[in-house]
Image (cartoon, rainbow, N blue to C red):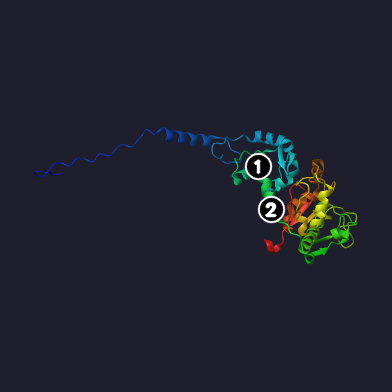
Amino acid sequence: MTILPNQTRPSPTVSKPLRTNPGPRTLLLALGLALLATMPTVSGIRPMGTIAKIPPSKAAESNKTLVASLKWTFGSKEQTGWKVYVPLMQRMLKTQADPETVEFVQAVSRWQNQQGIPPTGILDETTLMEMVKTWQGERPVKNPTEAMPDALVSIDRAALYDITREAQLCFVERETYMAYQDMVAAALKDPSLGLKKNSTGGLAADEPFLKIISAFRSQAYQDQLRRQSPDVGRAGLAKVSPHLTGQALDIYVGGEPVTTKDENRLLQIQTPVYRWLVQHAAEFGFYPYFYEPWHWEYRRKNSL
């Protein structure tokens, strides 16, 4: 470069050196990310935040205990364990694995991750209550109002669990009854259920499964039931029942028809008919009340 007279040489441009000593905040962030990357995962799901993951085998051991011992509350009544709800959980989790298995842990972990719950794979109270919230949210009858008489039809006596049931209790909402008949027809075609048929292909007179125990109940009748059982609580007998609408059916699935004792519900959830309903009832518009294996509510087509 030529320097003319009276011209000074320009100062060379000096680049500032890059900072090579990160501050403490940067170091802590880097350390945290490194720890998260090395922490064990369940089914390849990264932990949320800095929640430490539990080895799947340990989570399976926890589930094996909690299925029979977890203390929680529903309807002001203390509950113990969640074995009664395993078939519903399996459907929700898209698995047939048993609670004590690693496969079940992986399915729980995936579901927890989807719900924004730390994916530990352990079905604890937080996870269970989120499941209950989901099941309750799926129920079609939200704010029951009493069905108008012209919306109801009479139930064929052959479809009743108790053919001597008084006439005022033998009504059901019209569309609900048609969907119920379609569902029963589909169940009768499944040989694994071993349902007895009559000469016309319907449920035989001596076949109790899938028969209707209860359908439409007026508010006056519901009030009468509550007066007869004042200590039953909300979980056992609602003040304003979905049966008011005629879209709720109590269907026989085994054991004592409508007894909420754990030993009875545990018997009911093991029957092939109940497990079939869990897997197929939604195809016909019916959704369960999780607490009562016999209680199913219909979602009308115009409400979709």
Picture coordinates of residue 161, whole percent (x, y): 87, 54
Which residue in the structure is indicated by mark 1?
127
How crowded pointer 1 is (Cα within 10 Å; few <14, some 14-19, many 20+) is rated as many
Picture coordinates of residue 264, whole percent (x, y): 82, 43
Q: CA distance from mark 1 to mark 2?
A: 17 Å
Q: Which amino acid, mark 2?
A: Glu
Instruction: Identify the residue shown where x is 84% and y is 48%.
Output: 228
Q: In the rendered view, does 211 fall on the left or right side of 9?
A: right
Indicate whether 11 appears above or below 206.
above
Of residues 242 and 119, the one drawn nearer to the viewer in this rendering: 242
Of residues 275 and 231, the one drawn nearer to the viewer in this rendering: 231
Question: Which corner quadrant holds the C terminus?
Answer: bottom right
Whichever of callouts 1 and 2 sits on the residue coming sooner in the sequence is: 1
Q: Which amino acid, mark 1?
A: Thr
Which residue in the structure is indicated by mark 2?
138
Instruction: Identify the residue shown where x is 74% and y is 37%.
Output: 68
Q: Quadrant of residue 112?
A: top right
